[in-house]
Image (cartoon, rainbow, N blue to C red):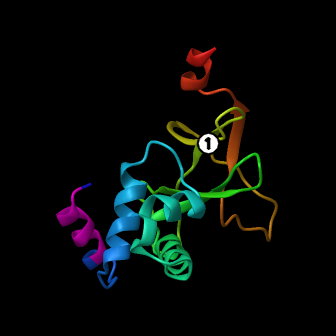
Amino acid sequence: MTVAEIEQVLVLNKIRKTSVRVLVLNALSESKIALSPAELESSFGNQTDRITLYRTLKLYEEKGLIHRIYNSFGEAKYAACLDQCKEHAHSDRHLHFNCLKCKGTFCMNHIEIPLFTLPEGMMALHYNFSVEGICSTCREEN
């Protein structure tokens, strides 16, 4: 995603542009794996502080720009949402793959979770379907 495209997304979602917000959205949209706040923070160096990073992640999740995934190790990771997600209405119904070796978390956007019906009175707010295994990069290293 280019900086101009990121700025357009921010305008469309009524989010004030800051350097950190552009940085975070760019990092998540360009990454092939979901990233933890610690991974984001270390890649940004001194360009942001932890509080600003967490506030940005929370805002983006609320606006439907990113989604949170808990990996097999209980760690929260974040990935860019698909275009159909909206504010307070995530529609990312896809599988996640957790590599047990490198601890990478991958969105498998091409593997959609089938629709299901919950018992009356229950409402799903977040889907987290994951598979554990060894990713192709780690398999090639052996």
Outermost residue toward the front in this view = 46
**Where residue 11 sits: x, y (%)?**
25, 78
User: Is 79 above or below relative to 23?
Assistant: above
Q: As rendered, which of 81 and 117 lies closer to the eye?
A: 81
For badge 1, the amino acid type reads: His
- Asked if residue 9 lies in the magenta stretch, the reply is yes
**Side of 114 relative to 92 (left or right):** right
Q: Locate residue 131: give its quadrant.
A: top right
**Where residue 91 sits: x, y (%)?**
52, 58
Residue at image location 52% in from the left, 70% down from the top: 61
Residue at image location 43% in from the left, 56% down from the top: 28
Q: Which residues are magenta?
A: 2-10
Q: As rendered, which of 116 and 59 lies closer to the eye?
A: 59
**Side of 100 relative to 3 (left or right):** right
- Asked if residue 79 lies in the magenta stretch, the reply is no
Number of residues whose C-alpha sits closer than 10 Å to that of mark 1, classed few (under 14), some (14–19) or many (20 or more): many
Q: Does the rendering let one see residue 72? A: yes
Q: Which residue is mark 1?
A: 96
What secondary structure predominates along the stretch shown in magenta? helix
**Where residue 10 sits: x, y (%)?**
30, 75
Q: As rendered, which of 73 and 66 lies closer to the eye?
A: 73
User: Is 133 above or below relative to 108?
Assistant: above
**Where residue 70 sits: x, y (%)?**
69, 55
Q: Does the rendering let one see residue 86? A: no
**Side of 30 relative to 71 (left or right):** left
User: Is 69 above or below relative to 88?
Assistant: above
